[in-house]
């Protein structure tokens, strides 16, 4: 399975320098660098600010992971607002039947580190048998960026 990053702007991108990554991110990068094509996102908007995080949503009953994402601020809340719209029907069903919650799995990341961590964490979770709703029916949901 190959994942790639969609960039909203046409920037020149290049290879990742593992030495520039935080240790936990570097370990994931090294583990999966031959599996995925990682491209450096444009850092002009963020520089090396460590304001990004990677999060996951799970069911409270058995802690089944159903969503992995990256963000800043309160990005993780999109699941709650999506439940109020038709695209959040799966989230609403999980909430009603099992209860749902989120956790931050990595914080204080640069944009690049968050991109790498997110894609590797998605792979880690799906390899563990988790079914991520953002990939239901093989179509990436609107809130999914990869």
Image (tube, rainbow, N blue to C red):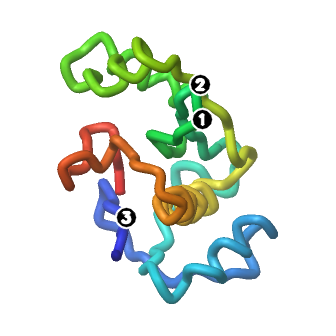
First reached walking from the N terminus: tag 3 or tag 1: 3
* Residue shown at 59% from the left, 40% from the top: 55
Mark 2 secondary-structure assignment: loop
Q: In front of the other: label 2 or label 3?
A: 2
Mark 1 closeness class: few <14, some 14–19, many ≥20 residues within 10 Å? some
Mark 3 closeness class: few <14, some 14–19, many ≥20 residues within 10 Å? some
- Whether 34 is drawn above or below 75: the answer is below
The percent position of residue 83, horizontal first and vertical second, equals 33, 16
Figure quadrant of the N terminus: bottom left
Q: In front of the other: label 3 or label 1?
A: 1
Q: Which residue is mark 1?
A: 63
Dot label at residue 60 = 2
Figure quadrant of the C terminus: bottom left
- Whether 132 is drawn above or below 83: the answer is below
Q: Nearer the viewer, residue 56 or 127?
A: 127
Between the C-alphas of marks 2 and 3, the distance is 30 Å
Mark 2 closeness class: few <14, some 14–19, many ≥20 residues within 10 Å? some
Horizontal side of residue 118 vs 96, given as left or right: right
Between the C-alphas of marks 3 and 1, the distance is 28 Å
Mark 3 secondary-structure assignment: loop
Q: Which residue is mark 3?
A: 5
């Amino acid at each position: 399975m190959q994942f790639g990053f969609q960039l909203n702007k046409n920037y020149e991108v290049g290879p990742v320098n593992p030495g520039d990554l935080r240790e936990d991110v570097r370990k994931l990068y090294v583990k999966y660098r031959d599996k995925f094509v990682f491209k450096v996102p444009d850092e002009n908007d963020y520089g090396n600010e460590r304001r990004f995080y990677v999060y996951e949503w799970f069911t409270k009953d058995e802690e089944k992971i159903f969503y992995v994402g990256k963000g800043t601020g309160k990005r993780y809340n999109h699941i709650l607002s999506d439940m109020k719209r038709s695209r959040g029907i799966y989230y609403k069903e999980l909430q009603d039947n099992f209860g749902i919650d989120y956790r931050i799995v990595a914080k204080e990341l640069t944009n690049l580190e968050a991109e790498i961590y997110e894609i590797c964490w998605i792979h880690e979770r799906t390899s563990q048998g988790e079914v991520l709703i953002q990939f239901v029916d093989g179509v990436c949901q609107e809130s999914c960026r990869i």
